[in-house]
Amino acid sequence: MSSAQTFKKENYRLFLLGVALVTIGYILMIGGGSDDPNVFNPEIFSFRRIVLSPVIIVVGFLVITYGIMRKSK
């Protein structure tokens, strides 16, 4: 029997890069709330939380998918 590995070192690196991107995206989304529920904080609708963070999260999931599907040479 052959002891072929399913994932090579490059696959794990891509997977971990994707996990790091998803984590960074969620960290960027944190905050913007108000301590007082009667006061509205418009910072919740900032570019960072509405555009940048979701794009980074989607790119992270794409990198994870590519890392899983990539065949080693």
Image (spheres, grey):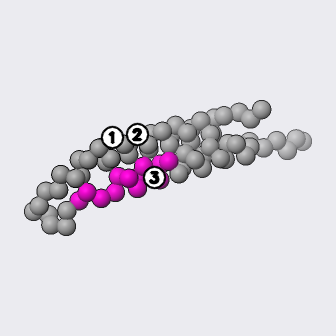
What secondary structure is the stretch in magenta mostly built from?
A: helix
Q: Quadrant of residue 36?
A: bottom left
Q: Nearer the viewer, residue 28 or 57?
A: 28
Chain part drawn in magenta: 21-33
Q: Secondary structure at mark 2?
A: helix
Give yes or no for residue 3 being in the magenta stretch: no
Residue topped by disc 3 = 24
Residue beneath the point at 60% across and 50% down = 16
Rendered position, 28 above or below 7: below
Give the side of residue 28 with respect to residue 34, left or right: right
Residue topped by disc 2 = 55
Residue 34 at x, y = what percent?
19, 62
- Which kind of residue does numbered mark 1 sit on? Val
Give yes or no for residue 30 being in the magenta stretch: yes
Q: Mark 1 and mark 3: span between their CA atoms?
A: 14 Å
Q: Earlier in the sequence, mark 3 or mark 2?
A: 3
Are the residues tagged 1 and 2 within 8 Å (C-beta)?
yes
Q: Quadrant of the C terminus?
A: top right
- Which kind of residue does numbered mark 3 sit on? Ile
